[in-house]
Image (tube, grey):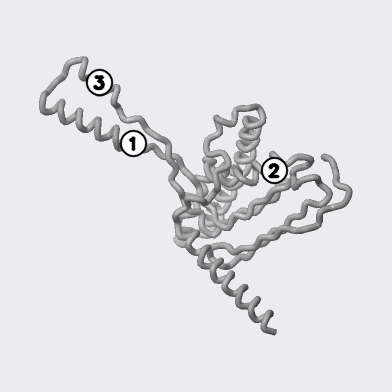
Amino acid sequence: MGNLLGSPITEKETHTGWTPDGKLQYGVSSMQGWRIHMEDAHICQPFLYAEAPQESQSNNNCRNLNSQTSDMSIKKQKNDEESTTVKSNAVTPSSQWTQIPVPNHSLYAVFDGHGGSFAAEYAGRNFCRVLSRTTHFIQYAHHIKKDTATMTPSEQAQHRTEGLSYLEESLNNAFIELDREIYQHVYGESSTVKDSNQIYGENYEHEEVTQLQAIMEKENSHSQTNSASSEND
């Protein structure tokens, strides 16, 4: 379980926040205790989204291909040499991610280091990314968009059951994939892990972030007002 200090470090690091809809307040507090260094990590992710891969085309390659196609139409060149040239300039797909909002969902987790910090810290930084890209979580993001108002009670029950199944499978697969990534990092294959340690939500452009920022600004303003009132008293 690792080496211990002569006396525990009892200072606590505490963070609080709100979900984007302002309906759920959360908080987390951590303490190093007897350990030589903090071995645990946590996740407080107030909004979630799935990331689905998509195939996009390079603009430059598109222009090259269109230009060559136009020249072929005008000059009507059909020899093998030009055909080879066109193929060599074919558009090369590049992988991108389409963000799919999963409204009214949050993720909170604690990862216990158990004698070391690497696995816990890696999980804390990367679990949301890994989860968001699992096939079942992408399916879940689409699944919850379905209009259940017109469904019969039995159909609604089936819809909920299917949704829970997607969530269960996505969580199971996310932990398995996370284990695989940690294995690759430990054995020097980290270059094969794309977007490792990327901050989840950093480039999220949907309304959840704007709502969350507004709530936090309001909360900070309220805290400052209370602090000023206490000082005056």
Q: Relative to 142, does residue 72 appear above or below in the rendering?
A: above
**Outermost front residue:** 232
Number of residues whose C-alpha sits closer than 10 Å to that of mark 3, classed few (under 14), some (14–19) or many (20 or more): few
Residue identified by numbered label 2: 120
Amino acid carrying label 2: it is: Ala
Q: CA distance from mark 1 to mark 3?
A: 19 Å
Reading the image, the residue beneath label 3 is: 85
Q: Residues within 10 Å of mark 2 (few under 14, many from 20)?
A: some
Separation of marks 1 and 2 at Cα, in angstroms: 38 Å
Residue of label 1: 57
Point out residue 38 in the picture as x, y percentages from the top left corner.
Answer: 75, 47
Q: Residue at x 58, y 67 (%)?
A: 23
Q: Secondary structure at mark 1?
A: loop
Q: Residue at x 67, y 44 (%)?
A: 121
Question: Where residue 164 appears, x then y in whole percent?
Answer: 59, 50
Q: Is residue 63 above or below residue 125?
A: above
Give amino acid for label 1: Gln
In the shown orientation, is residue 109 left or right of residue 209? right
* Most distant residue in the top direction: 80
